[in-house]
Amino acid sequence: MIKFIDLLVQHKQIEYELNTVIQQVIEDSAFVYGKYLTDFENNFAEKIWAKNCIGVANGTDALIIVLKCLGIKQGDEVITAANSFIASAEAISNIGAKPVFVDHDKYYGINVDLIEKKINKNTKAIIPVHLYGQSCDIEKVQEICKKYGLYMIEDTAQSHFAKYKNKYTGTYGNAGCFSFYPSKNLGAMGDGGAIVTNDDKLAEKIRIYANHGSVSKYQHITEGINSRLDGMQAAILNVKLKYVDKWNRQRNLAGLFYNSLLSDCEFVESPDIRKYSEHFFHIYAIKCKKRDELQMFLKSNGIQTGIHYPIALPYLQCYDYLQHKSEDFSQSFKNQSKLLSLPMYPDITQEQILHIVKLIKEFYAKY
């Protein structure tokens, strides 16, 4: 069997280091806040070329906290991608604002040519999503935000250390929001997230809000929430941070190898790579004919796959109240039944990829 993602093989490579820091955290009883969190925040900020990093409980909290601290409120509208995980949109709804969706371009990033027609007097921010490990057309989004005086909050949950024009995703906007869910390119052993920003005042507001609105114990200057990256996860992430560049390079090579092998398969469209960007293939998603049948065929041959995402955000039941039609987001609607995610992780071998592609071509040979 070839797993969709094999976390164990990665952990085995750094098992001694992980066990050592886990034991250190236990011996220091540094489970909440403390030096392990501070070290990770400093190291992550330095590595991504940001002034501030604030660890939080998860990537969804990161989005909610930034929106809240930027003053987004009930009655406001926030534009985001129609094709993403629900966190990108539910963060907007959770603070009482309205999510406004935009279809995607051929790279699966938000289509910048469609954004301006969605802007009105209630629009306050844009959340572009760097999907699958590749930057969206982030400079154009930045220009639009500047033109209309909008905040930009980058959803970088899938694009750890990806770049556009030699600048890291997450550092273009007012803030970048990261998830450290275990399957991410930089993943914890549980939930975790972080916010990066070059705005010192915003960083201070975020720290206070995420800590019950407190500046010191029992001194609460505002009502906040409790959202913390715990010391154990911070210590684990600090170990993995040393290896993430290597792992991203391995993902890139695996993705390019898939692309080369699938280039002559007329039934499959491999992911395009945006000019000036580095794609680190958090997800390797192909667009294919007879997607569901192919998925079942691969499963019957021991290949695990995924679908990202089977229902585009505007068509989820929870957004029925927006009354969107299929033609409103034609690309997202069409591709939700065509995209299939193949096994992708740093240590997937060329032999495994060759086997997967052989099976794909075998499936389509009958058509």
Image: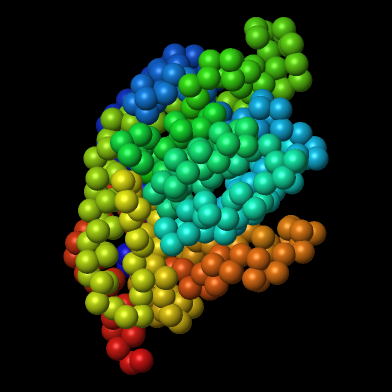
* Percent x, y of residue 132: 43, 53
Coordinates of residue 173 in the picture (x, y in percent): 51, 32
| Residue farthest along the front direction in this orientation | 147
* Closest to the observer, 172 or 300: 172
Residue closer to the observer: 144 or 211 = 144
Query: Percent position (x, y) of residue 152?
Result: 57, 35
| Furthest-left residue in this view | 351
Q: Is residue 366 left or right of residue 207?
A: left
Q: Residue drawn at (51%, 38%), measured in percent from left and top?
A: 143
- Judged from this view, the residue extending furthest toward the bottom is 366
- Eyeballing the image, is 285 above or below 266? above
Q: Nearer the viewer, residue 237 or 141?
A: 141
Taking the spot 33% from the left edge, 85% from the top edge, the residue there is 364
> In the rendered image of this protein, does residue 18 appear above or below residue 247?
above
Please tell me which residue is depicted at 66% across the width and 25% down the height of the picture. 69
Q: Quadrant of residue 169?
A: top left
Whole-percent x and y of residue 33?
53, 17
How many numbered badges does the structure rendering display?
0
- Rendering colour mode: rainbow
The answer to whether one can see residue 335 in this image is: yes
- Residue 186 occupies quadrant: top left
- Where is the C terminus found, in terms of image quarters? bottom left
Q: Which residue shows up at 35% across the image and 75% down it?
A: 268
